[in-house]
Amino acid sequence: MEYPTFAESLDLAIDRERAAVAFYDELLHLASFAAQKSTLAEFRAMEEGHVTKLTSMKAGGKLKLSAKTVVDLGLAQSLSPSEPSAAAMTYQDILVSAIKKEERSAALYRDLAATALDTDIGETFALLAMEEGRHKRYFEELYDSEVARDN
Amino acid sequence: MDIKDFIAPFAVWKRAFEKPFTVKKPIDQRPGAPRYRGFHKNDVDKCVGCGTCEAICMNKAIDLVPVAGREAKAGDSGLRPKIDYGRCCWCALCVDICPSGSLSMSNEYLWIDRDPEAFRYVPGVDKKPWDSATLGYSRAEGYRLLEGKRVDMAELPHAEALKSFLELVRGYSREQAEKEADRCVSCGICVASCPAHMDIPGYIKAVRDGNLETGLRLLYETNPFPEACGRVCTHLCEEACSIGSDGDPVAIRWLKRYIADQVELSNYGQILPRAEPSTGKKVAVIGAGPGGLSAAYYLGLLGYKVTVFEKDKAAGGMLRYGIPEYRLPYPALDKDIGYIESLGVEIKRGVAVGSSLSLASLRRDFDAVYISTGLPVAYSLEIPGDKHPRVLDGVAVLAAATRGEALGLGAKVAVIGGGNVAMDAARTALRNGASVDILYRRREEDMPADPQEIAEAKAEGARLIEKAIPIEVKDAKEGGALFVWNEARMVQKEEGKRPVPEAIPGAIKEERYDSIIAAIGQGPELSFVTEEDGIAIKRFKPQVSREGKTSAGNVFAGGDLVNDRKDAISAIADGHRAAQAIDRLLGGKGV
């Protein structure tokens, strides 16, 4: 991965999105009631959408992602990285794990962008980092408005 | 014939050369006096469309009409006065009484137009030459036909209040209530802002007229919790009150309490409507909070056999277990609940749905089910160390206080959060002898708690630490827990969005506390709803129609669980709407 090609970069991103789908699959398997399952299924579908999107971009040979940097609310840094116990997951637990997951992906892409020797590949990772930042922001906004309403 | 009759025609000629008493160009040469009452002006942005001008006009020269580009919203009917100068007598009573002070009169008094329709116009909307006139008539500074100051409510002094859980607010006497009711102009703008659309002008008039039986009937038409709401309602009505646009809003909440306080529970039965004959149908309600019991009350009135399943040992939900007694004494809540039970509503206390009793079995055994289980799960701080034994959840602390348990909070307490639960937890801790810090991530003005609650918590001695981002909880050497936070500054990161707290690098603070009460938010407990129940749920919220119907045929849901307001009056309104919808589903008229 030291000198990845465009296709390899996209493969990495697609694999990470597939891992996210698998993550939600695992939680879905452990979930015990309808509210957990519907929320996890919704988030899983989002990740599946990302797989499809990236796969089609890989086939097209071009990354069509917005280069607009999303504003960081700074919420993720202050949240504990602990993973929830699946059977009793609350909405808060699910959102926190989603935020942390997106944060980790964004951080990885940022690192890869910073260390890439090829400018185009660096740009690809930078765009992927921004995309993950947008996903994180989406979950952070949900967290801010629906969970930490009084904080 | 007299000689003067012959001379007169010649005598008047001598006047022909004198200066005339009339003027050729009256507009130029005879301007109105500085405070002359000429044509109306209206500051349409200040005007709230309350219609008090229309009501006071003796000549019926004013109509409230819709105007383009101005929609109705909380505290504004969206209508504006239209003046008919065929009727106006320029008495200026409309200006004198205008609650917002938006209406005034220019000193222009001459206007010539061949079109008679032109003399009916909406000041401030239909542009006129005198719109920018500075002279004319407006209400003099300090002069008001309406009383702008509300009748004070006696309260326990703060130092006294901290010694016990005695109710803070004492309630109006008859004289005070009637005086306060007299301030209402019956504009009705408040009705739209009340989630339950209570007949507020109607029951205030009943207070004014000394007719409390009518008042109680009007309260119960839309709200079977007048004692509770008369004390702890979020009173959106008062925010909308037109009198409040230039003075203190009418104390609507206290007047509601006055009516309920004055009528004995034993007399309710003679005053309020009794239940209709039995329909032979049964409805189950899950949760005996204000929403569930509101549904139960209206279903009971419609002749349904209602059984309410409540997991706790006492009914009332968050009104009992989330609001301290100094704000809502239990006898007052019990009075509301007692009347609902007197209609034949059965409350099964200490029965949780989900363990031995499933939702599926309720659906089988009852004709309809209403879920109103609220938000009983306290969300955690989600920071390292938040499982420390001295980190408590605010909802649990308040519930323990209700049950009369020893709280063991210690001498120094931190409350994390800025909502009403945080304020109630802080004030409960103060009454248990603790010194209290309230730490909030944003600024005081961003706090979602009722401003009155915040002010009272501070007045009782709580210290508010704003812009404090929780970082960690650690063991303290001296015992208890060390709370670590990062000081923040508010940054406007995006235009049009609220400022965001941003940690100031290196500005780490820590303080030792005996207890740290987390009150950052609450969520639902929905483990009793399975996929087989067929209720569509999105992000832990059952999806419902406007009337509370879920995707599962005979199951309805409402209250904090589904609405965004998350207050008692909204839950009550949801319960009422769902009761009507359930009635329609089961063959009734739903009224």
Image: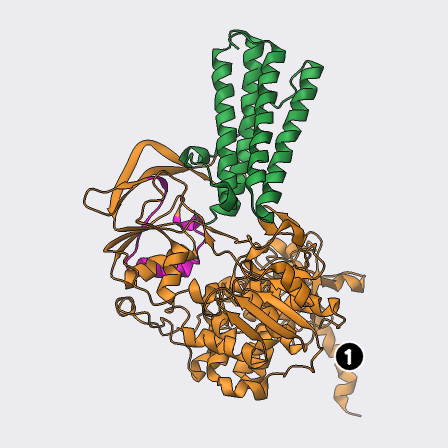
Question: What is the letter of the green chain?
Answer: A
Amino acid on which disc 1 is placed: Pro
Can you tell which quarter of the image residue B467 is in? Answer: top left
Which quarter of the rendering shows the N terminus of chain B? bottom right
On whether residue B326 falls in the magenta region, the answer is no
Q: Judge whether B320 appears above or below A134 on screen.
A: below
Which quarter of the rendering shows the C terminus of chain B? bottom right
- The residue at which mark 1 appears reads as B9
Q: Judge whether B581 appears above or below B345 on screen.
A: above
Q: Judge whether B370 appears above or below B522 on screen.
A: below
Residue B346 in the image: state x and y as whole percent. 56, 75
- Camera-side residue of B372 and B546: B372
Residue B415 in the image: state x and y as whole percent. 34, 51
Image: magenta residue range? B444-472
- Camera-side residue of B258 and B397: B397
Which residue is at 55% across, 58% downward? B354
Can you tell which quarter of the image residue B20 is in? Answer: bottom right
Residue A45 in the image: state x and y as whole percent. 64, 35
Chain B rendering hue: orange
Which residue is at 34% across, 40% downward? B385
Report if residue A58 is visible in the image: yes
